[in-house]
Amino acid sequence: MAEFVVTPWEVKGEIDYEKLIDKFGTSPIDEALLKRIEKHTGELHALLRRKIFYSHRSLNWIVSEYEKGNRFVLYTGRGPSGHTHLGHLMPWIFTRWLQEKFDVRLIFQLTDDEKFLFNPDFSLEDTKKFSYENALDIIALGFDPEKTEIFLNTEYIKIQYRIALNVAKKITLSTAKAVFGFKNETNIGMIFFTSMQSAPCFLESERENRAVPVLIPCAIDQDPHFRITRDVAPSLGYPKPALIHCKFFPSLAGGDKMSASKPETSIYTVDNPKEARKKIMQAFTGGQESVELQRKVGGNPGVCSIYQYLYYFFEENDEKIKERYSACTSGAILCGECKKYLADRVEKFLIEHQKKREKAKELLEEFIVRD
Amino acid sequence: MAEFVVTPWEVKGEIDYEKLIDKFGTSPIDEALLKRIEKHTGELHALLRRKIFYSHRSLNWIVSEYEKGNRFVLYTGRGPSGHTHLGHLMPWIFTRWLQEKFDVRLIFQLTDDEKFLFNPDFSLEDTKKFSYENALDIIALGFDPEKTEIFLNTEYIKIQYRIALNVAKKITLSTAKAVFGFKNETNIGMIFFTSMQSAPCFLESERENRAVPVLIPCAIDQDPHFRITRDVAPSLGYPKPALIHCKFFPSLAGGDKMSASKPETSIYTVDNPKEARKKIMQAFTGGQESVELQRKVGGNPGVCSIYQYLYYFFEENDEKIKERYSACTSGAILCGECKKYLADRVEKFLIEHQKKREKAKELLEEFIVRD
């Protein structure tokens, strides 16, 4: 099997998600844990039922604390390197569900510093602009303005810098090199940056001057940052943040993780819905070379980007997704039908989302916090 | 000759200041440059006349710009690792003189972040406390409140963090390792820190949105930071900061650079004047083993901490210092007399300074800037 690489800044190869659990030392979300969650949420989100959120650290502890009345705070983030695509929305939608079901606060960090440091072409003005664009998408998802704060690192730096200094003092260059693969050419901002991504894990504990549990929903590639955070937390007197990890959203070209650098293989929230439809109609599927062959041997939904889109995002109904799977493998339906089905749903979603995104412009100042 | 080491965090061995100019690649302050300065200041400060401020970078350019009507900004700083001693005051007194003679603004950075990161025993609360103590000494020296701003890095971080990110992006890990000797055990905050020390070099240019010349009076051990700053300045569109470097203030134990870690060999601004007198009476001198021998062969002012104190700080009168030198080498005076002479002056200085330091408490808020 081909080797795969997963770091916060690089995902390549065909990812073996089970192996990643071993490699990173996280735990799979098992049925017992799902039951514990369901007891409080009343239902399981499709992303949990379908094991797209599939791995965790200390999630049992978060539920135990919650059961004792010690409510956690959610923390997630976004590296503002361009427009938001559907892959970004996925963990945010799940985060919003967690906020609603557990009635908890959310800290949303926009790492404009990170994306500036890691991309030679970006100025801080660029990553600030992207941050505010991305914030509109976050707000459009319906987070509770009373319980949600969104900030850019360069705009909410005072308390974060203090926490980051405390974290940075505990992280040696060796550790940073081993975890992130930094080289001699790496700039010194990149080396420091992980301390900034750690900061929100301890923000609420600092503010409230007590140990506040934190749960981080994120894609699994972000785990290395928080593995370090968890290592240093006890010596700083903070609880270790818990994590719930998701797999990567599929690319329309097939393969894993939608990439912002290939716009034709991703659907952006600001895409013209008609353009998005076109991207879908041209997407990679698991279909056969001819209609005849497809009717005879059926398609392969396992490699089909259209099926993956439905499975991850656009077909929440478990019965319907099963039926589609069978209809594909039996040759009962053709790729064009699935494409059209998905395109209709994506188009509808984008039209709705873009309306909410417009309204979000008026709500922005309710959500953004600054020093 | 013994090897000597001079970095921003370590000074050891017997320092060859001329060699340091070659090693660091700075320029000596020659007579022509002194004349250019004198043309504007009307007189030369003893620290210039005596070549204690002896090295520079781009100081001719600073004078040229000044002559064109493009006034520079002074920038200096302090790593708040404890109480202020007389060695710290020396460059500040010179900075104050520059402020007065050239009628220019001063930016004073207190690097509470640095001292926290570099000292395992300090908390951020400790270095904050030291910062405010040190600020009283700065203010007591008589800087113009209208033209001086003092800040702690953790309290004036917003604009500095943005500038530091721009600087950090241009500095590779290799460079930081080569310049500062960082190792794998170095924490990642220390590696980033030089960017923060660079930030004030570009602060005024950022604020005024034009190229503002900056002159940094500092001890020569701080040069490595600014060598990097100067390397990255052009690519960031800022002018290179100019520097004027001084030698290290002598220790009462003999040798170079008063060390805060050996309190008995330094005089602190908060020392009880009587205690300070005691330290001086016990200091290392260039005297002979017996009065008889001293009368016969004379003392050695070159290695005498008492003579150095007078030369660096407490005897501004050139005639008098020359006379004392001759009287010592000829055996005409004994160490006890010099000690008493210095002790009287130090005692008087401390009594005066401590009064001004008390008054500085009321002026603090006029000088301190925060985000």
Image (tube, coloured by chain):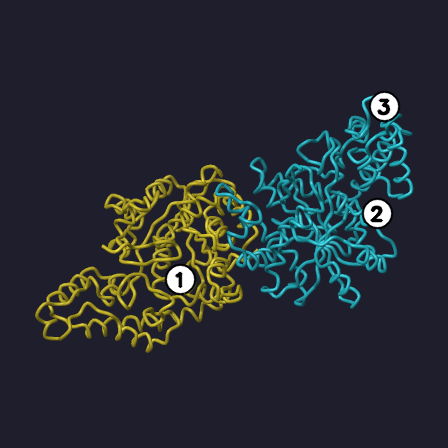
Chain colours: A cyan, B yellow
- Chain under label 1? B
- Element type at marker 3? helix
> Closer to the camera, B232 or B107?
B232
Mark whose residue sits in front, 1 or 3: 3
Report the disc number at residue B70: none
The residue to which callout 3 is attached is A293
x, y (%) of residue B22? 28, 45
x, y (%) of residue A289? 81, 22
Q: Residue B208: in sight, yes or no?
A: no
Q: Amino acid at mark 2?
A: Ala
Contact (CB < 8 A) between labels 2 and 1? no
- B46 relative to B173, above or below: below
Mark 3 → mark 2, Cα distance in angstroms: 33 Å
Q: Residue at x 30, y 65 (%)?
A: B251
Left-right relation of B359 to B250: right
Q: Residue at x 47, y 52 (%)?
A: B184
Mark 1 → mark 3, Cα distance in angstroms: 90 Å
Contact (CB < 8 A) between labels 3 and 2? no
Mark whose residue sits in front, 2 or 1: 2
The residue to which callout 1 is attached is B142
Report the disc number at residue A46: 2
